[in-house]
Amino acid sequence: MTERKGKSGTIDVKALLAGDEEFLRALVRTALQEVLEAEMTEALGAEKSERAAGRLGYRSGYYGRTLITRIGKLELRVPQDRAGRFSTELFERYQRSERALVAALAEMYVQGVSTRKVKAITEELCGHSFSASSISAINQRLDANLAQFAGRPLAEAFPYLILDARYERVREAGVISSQAVLIAIGIDWDGRRQVLAVELANRESRSSWRDFLLALKARGLNGVEFVVADDHAGLRAALREVLAEAAYQRCYVHFLRNALDYVPRRVDDDCLQELRWLYDRRDLTEARRDLAEYSKLTGWVEDNIDETLSFYRLPRQHHKHLKSTNMLERLNEEIKRRTHVVRIFPNAESCLRLVRALAVETHENWLEQHRYLNMDDLHEHKKEALRRAA
């Protein structure tokens, strides 16, 4: 195995691992095997061969289990206890989205819309071909879990809401069309991100966004104070109707892209650079002062820029996170990377199944991470606003 060295002469571990998939698989397998052993120890209240007064049971060998991951198949030994009570969430956690992907590929194959490549991929992932009955069984298990996630009550308040949509190609009645995948992310008062909803719609219309938001409210969505989204007429109309009390922040990244169509070509680079700098100002007063001094802006930019400055009403610590939809864009990029394998979904159900499975994976990872925002900053910001108003 060749050692790779960076500029400093030290070993580039990242490059080394990326270039040796077998070593990386062995490393991950060892780590996951240790996770399984630790779970069994915790369940029994004792290590192997340990004499402990509080022991809750005894080990009883292992059984083999294959875990399909992004670095290939991993053959693991799952510990068993004599009473048969031990279970692990490891496989459910890491294979949910892979099963959804496999199900989508396999469904294409069974319905006769696939290629040899699709068949090769499904056989490589799971080691065998698929029958209609096996696909049905996979989908039933997945759909039950995903439906539970999609319909869960939203008891806590979400002061921040981020909305966006992406498009996937779906075959319906023999016709291929683009379907809008509507996604909502909320940030709760603990400062944690949550995927609140993922739904499919024929297009981004006022009615589709309205139904999407009303479904969220029916599940208990409350306390929304600030919404970040792109400028879409249907979405804007739905927000005015369903969440009229919330402030609206137009994503400044999308705004800058749109501005290219309105600023003179000879000054567009300078103009866009000036506009980017505006969004780094400490407060709205500074931003407006600099905006007034810059003379190259067109009428369109001056008429529309205010709705991209709503984030200045938030604590300064939250500005970079809530002046754009970039956080949701990153989730969309991961969805795009995974759905690209399918390219054209055989039906809407298989599309929604895979996208939701990916969303659940992200949602669970977010809940386990450190909080995304310190919401004490928002509490203090609101108190200060009340003191100034008194």
Image (spheres, rainbow, N blue to C red):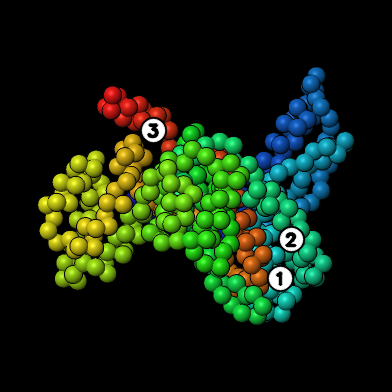
Check whether the beta carbons of the residues at disc 1 and disc 2 lie within 8 A of each other. Answer: yes
Q: Is residue 151 left or right of residue 62?
A: left
Q: Secondary structure at mark 1?
A: helix
- What's the amino acid at mark 1? Glu
Please tell me the numbered disc located at residue 179.
none
Q: Is residue 128 left or right of residue 261?
A: right
Question: Which dot, 3 or 2, sits closer to the camera?
Answer: 3
The picture places residue 187, in percent across and down from the top left corner, at: 48, 41
Please tell me the numbered disc located at residue 139.
2
Q: Which residue is mark 3?
A: 378
Q: Residue extending furthest front?
A: 241
Q: Which residue is mark 1?
A: 107
- What's the amino acid at mark 2? Asn
* Residue at 69% from the left image edge and 48% from the top image edge: 148
Where is the C terminus found, in terms of image quarters? top left
Q: Nearer the viewer, residue 5 or 357?
A: 357
* Residue at 19% from the left image edge and 71% from the top image edge: 265
The picture places residue 228, in percent across and down from the top left corner, at: 41, 50
Check whether the beta carbons of the residues at disc 3 and disc 1 lie within 8 A of each other. Answer: no
Q: Nearer the viewer, residue 87 or 317?
A: 317
